[in-house]
Each structure stands twice: as C-alpha cells, then as structure tokens.
Amino acid sequence: MTNTLRTYELNEFQKKMISDIKSLPRKNLHYITAQQSDKHPNLTLPEMKKLIRRAIRRYIQEANLNYYSGLENELVKFYCVFETKKEFSLSQRSEKITNDEVSLGLHFHLFITCPDNYPWICFTSLSYQILRELSSLPKKKKCISKYGYFKIEDLNENFVQYHTKQQALTNREMTETNLPV
C-alpha cells in the first residue's frame, strides 16, 4: 500500500469527518455517488439532503411492518459529503474575479451501511429509492446525469480521502449524516 503525499494539513473538522466515515460498520458498507446535470435544472443542497433522508425513511417504512419514527436511524447509518465541480471549487479559491460563469456541479459521495448484525437491508433497492427521490421533483426530474453504487470491500484512507477530495472547502454545511455528533 502506498501512502499519499498530502500538501495540506487537515483541520479538526476534516479529521473528524474522515474518522466518522471510517467508523461506519464495515460488513455492509456501500458507496453511492450522484452528479447533477449541466443541461437541466438542479437540486439545491437543502433539497438533496432532504431527499436522501426521505429516501432512507421511505425504504425503511416500506420494508418494516413495525415501523416507528426514527427506526431508519437505527437501521441505516450514513455519512454524505457534498462537493462542487473542480472548476467551481478552484474558482472560489482564486483571488482573481472573473465574469465567466462556472457551473456549481453539486454532487455527493454517500457512505451508507447498516449494523453488522442486521443483514436485511437490500442496498440495491435502497440505492434505487435514493435515485427515485432525487428525481422526484416535477421541474427537476432530469437533474441527475450520473449515478453510481457499489459495495465497499476495503475502506482505506486513500479511498476516503479521494472521495472527499475537496476537504479544504468541506464544512458541516457540506455534509449530512445520522451519526451522533
């Protein structure tokens, strides 16, 4: 395994973010990413957060006859990092002001799992539920242009850092989780 040379220091929030992601139960750990379209109306950050939570809640409600409020937070653990396109991120760091319009390109990296002793979640179905919710707003049905999902077999530091690469701009507002604070 090769170590990545880091040219910046992580702040305390970034260290906690990486620690929280690495603390997720590993047996059923999955990764979902979604990129918004450049050609269609996009979701806002609050809309994306709300729709991801709603998808998880609806999946758990439909899958459990004895559903009660908050069950989804017991059965599904997640940490989501929202990022912008590289060009937008770089434009925010630049001291030069340009008149060029740079697309926000809001997208997310969602690490999602369940307790190791609870094998009854079908993450393929949950992933589709999340995609359905993200595409559910009438004027924003075509907002998602790329969507990916897979099971993480080996969660290592390089993978986490690569998929949270805008760490210099990441703050609490650009994350969503149901882990204890």
Image (cartoon, rainbow, N blue to C red):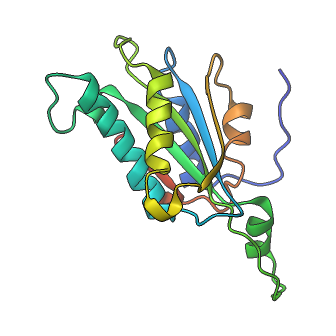
Occupied quadrant, residue 105? bottom right
Query: In front: 98, or 147?
Result: 147
Q: Determine whether, in the image, residue 164 is placed left or right of residue 82.
A: right
Q: Is residue 110 above or below residue 83?
A: above
Q: Is residue 90 above or below residue 128?
A: below
Tell me the residue at 65%/62% (across/down).
169
Q: Quadrant of residue 150?
A: top right
Residue closest to the eye, 130 or 39 = 39
Relative to 6, is 37 on the left or the right? left
Number of numbered discs on residues: 0
Residue 163 seen in the current view: yes
Taking the spot 59% from the left edge, 66% from the top edge, the residue there is 41
The picture quadrant where one finds residue 117 is: top left
Q: Residue at x 81, y 83 (%)?
A: 95
Residue 83: % across, % down: 64, 56
Quarter of the image where the N terminus is located = top right
Any part of residue 177 in sight: no
Q: Position of residue 64 (x, y in %)?
A: 22, 22
The spot of residue 107 in percent (x, y) is 62, 53
Query: Residue visible at 43% across and 58% down?
Result: 137
Q: Position of residue 39 (x, y in %)?
A: 70, 64
